[in-house]
């Protein structure tokens, strides 16, 4: 049978201990809420639950003043508030970083689109230039074909052998043969080597 001393021990137990356990339990619950929704609002709701539960206990047992005066309870509440502030700051940093990454991605996409457009424009310009050059060469070849073979041979004699071979290769066989006949043996030999070597590296199979 419990004596008066045991009764006094139970009566004299600090009410802050029970409240501290309740706060810890509610803190764990608020942490679970944070894991579920991933926002700082969960911890805030945990604080509201702590405050509401503490008020309910105080209304029934008159322990509000004791809990507020208990240094351990105050330390736990301070730690919870600091933790909540740290988590809010962390979430703000993550949101800012995500926004920066989104802006960087948009800029990369814009630059990529501009690069693709510039490349397409460059291809069109090159195609126009190639077409114009081909037209000019075709016209010049036609001019050389209409010249007298002797005059054309004198002109081709002064040309670079590779350049001359390029024109002779585009001419009709009978015209180019007449021009080649009017070249000096050395020039005709050099141009012939160039013409013969133009397709030596082309695969035969």
Image (tube, rainbow, N blue to C red):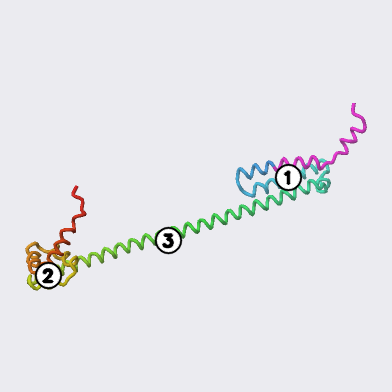
Q: Position of residue 159 (x, y in %)?
A: 17, 70
Q: Nearer the viewer, residue 102 or 164?
A: 164
Q: In front: mark 2 or mark 1?
A: 2
What secondary structure is found at the residue carrying circle 3?
helix
Give the residue pinned by disc 3.
111
Q: Residues within 10 Å of mark 2 (few under 14, many from 20)?
A: many
Quadrant (top left, top right, bottom left, bottom right) of the N terminus: top right
Q: Which circle's residue, 2 or 3, is located before the other in the chain?
A: 3
* CA neighbours of label 1 inside 10 A, class few (<14), some (14 to 19), many (20+): many
Q: Is residue 51 above or below residue 1?
A: below
Q: Is residue 180 left or right of residue 136?
A: left
SS class of the residue under badge 1? helix
The circle drawn on residue 50 is 1
Q: Residue 56: x and y, percent?
A: 77, 42
Residue 50 location (% of width, % of height): 73, 45
Q: Quadrant of residue 29?
A: top right
Q: Is residue 126 above or below residue 73?
A: below
Q: Name the front one of labels 1 and 3.
A: 3
Taking the magenta stretch, the answer to whether it contains residue 12 is yes
- Disc ID at residue 163: none
């Amino acid at each position: 049978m419990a004596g008066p001393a045991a009764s006094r021990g139970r009566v004299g137990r600090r009410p802050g201990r029970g409240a501290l356990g309740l706060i810890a339990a509610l803190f764990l619950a608020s942490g679970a809420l944070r894991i579920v929704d991933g926002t700082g609002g969960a911890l805030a709701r945990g604080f509201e639950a702590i405050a509401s539960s503490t008020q309910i206990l105080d209304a029934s047992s008159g322990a509000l003043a004791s809990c507020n005066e208990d240094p351990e309870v105050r330390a736990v509440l301070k730690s919870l508030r600091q933790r909540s502030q740290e988590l809010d700051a962390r979430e703000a940093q993550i949101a800012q970083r995500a926004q920066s990454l989104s802006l960087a991605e948009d800029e990369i996409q814009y630059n990529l689109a501009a690069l693709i457009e510039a490349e397409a424009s460059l291809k069109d310009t090159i195609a126009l230039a190639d077409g114009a050059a081909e037209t000019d060469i075709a016209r010049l070849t036609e001019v050389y074909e209409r010249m007298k073979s002797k005059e054309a041979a004198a002109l081709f004699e002064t040309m670079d052998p590779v350049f001359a071979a390029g024109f002779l290769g585009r001419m009709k066989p009978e015209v180019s043969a007449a021009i080649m006949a009017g070249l000096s043996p050395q020039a005709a030999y050099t141009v012939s080597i160039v013409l013969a070597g133009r397709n030596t590296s082309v695969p035969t199979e």
